[in-house]
Image (cartoon, rainbow, N blue to C red):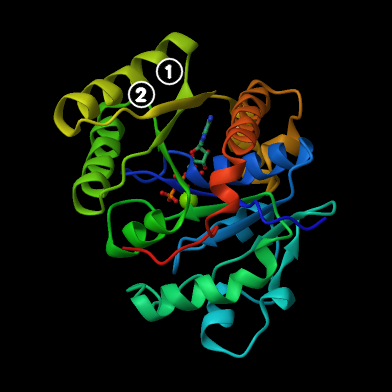
Amino acid sequence: MENNRTLSLSILSGKGGVGKTNIALNLAFGLHQLAQNTLLVDCDLGLANLDVMLGIAPEGSLHDVLNRDVRVEDILFNLGGRGLDLIPAASGVTDLLDFDEDQQDQVVRRLDGILKRYNFLILDIGAGISRTVQAFACMTHHRVVVITPEPTSLTDGYALIKVLSTQKKIQDFHIVVNMVASEKEANLGFERIRAASEKFLGISPNFLGYVHHDKVVSESVRKQKPFFQVGPKSVAARDIMNIAGRLADLRNASKDTIASSVPLRLGG
Ligand SMILES: Nc1ncnc2c1ncn2[C@@H]1O[C@H](COP(=O)(O)OP(=O)(O)OP(=O)(O)O)[C@@H](O)[C@H]1O
Ligand SMILES: [Mg+2]
């Protein structure tokens, strides 16, 4: 089914290792379960992880699309079921690290033809506040910042929001608190980043949800499968479904805005 209403999300974090890739991957499965066709793109250029997390050896990557005459259709990797696909990234390749405007423009143009097949486009981005991260963050409709309750993650998450809001004039951010022991801890983590963002930046991030610390996550990483498949009834999978449900609602609520905009635009 084709549509012109693809909602695009970039999954970001200040601090590394907070769970972006696991959340991006399992959210794609969760959205697909809600009948939302989803394309996941590994945008951690040079340090690709999604192929390893899935135990797959893809034949091509985003790198090939940008550097060789490879059709994007030919490197789409089906994750199981119609309408759930991955575009892998290349690992150990450095020539895309400074993701300049020409390359951004190429990504936008090369993906344009296939995006109408999907309801959601999810970009899994590398950690930090590099120029490449900022460019990807500016390309999508929405930004999801993943934090954990650790003070360093909160500080780095706030730093990312600060850079994007002051330098790129981005106002809307969604927060996911990962690896929490309880809902209370998630609320506390969100509250800290909300209070700082409101006080110092004048913006109010949206609380998209949280994911409990759950051993199924590391178990699934070792098994090279999504935790959504290893433990479909796990606490982490249930948490992901809550987030997926909110995203599906968000897409429904913003259909007109999405229809009148492009899913990927040139970064700032
Ligand atoms: N909810 C969770 N419960 C338990 N462990 C988790 C959870 N989320 C992530 N982890 C652990 O944290 C590790 C890092 O996760 P992941 O690779 O998704 O982070 P990342 O933010 O993508 O890292 P990077 O910044 O390197 O891209 C995983 O290997 C996993 O073991
Ligand atoms: Mg990652």
x 68%, y 82%: residue: 71
Residue nearer the viewer, 170 or 71: 170
- The amino acid on which the numbered mark 2 sits, given as a three-letter code, is Pro
Residue 212 in view in this figure: no
Looking at the rendered structure, the secondary structure element under dot 1 is: helix
Looking at the rendered structure, the secondary structure element under dot 2 is: loop
- Figure check: 44 above or below 238: below
Residue 52: give x, y in percent of width and height.
Answer: 61, 58
So how many labels did they put on this image? 2
Mark 1, residue position: 186
Quick one: label 1 or label 2, which is nearer the N terminus? 2
Mark 2, residue position: 149
Disc 1 versus disc 2: nearer the observer: 1
Residue 174: give x, y in percent of width and height.
Answer: 43, 34
- Figure check: 234 above or below 88: above
Quarter of the rendering containing residue 188? top left
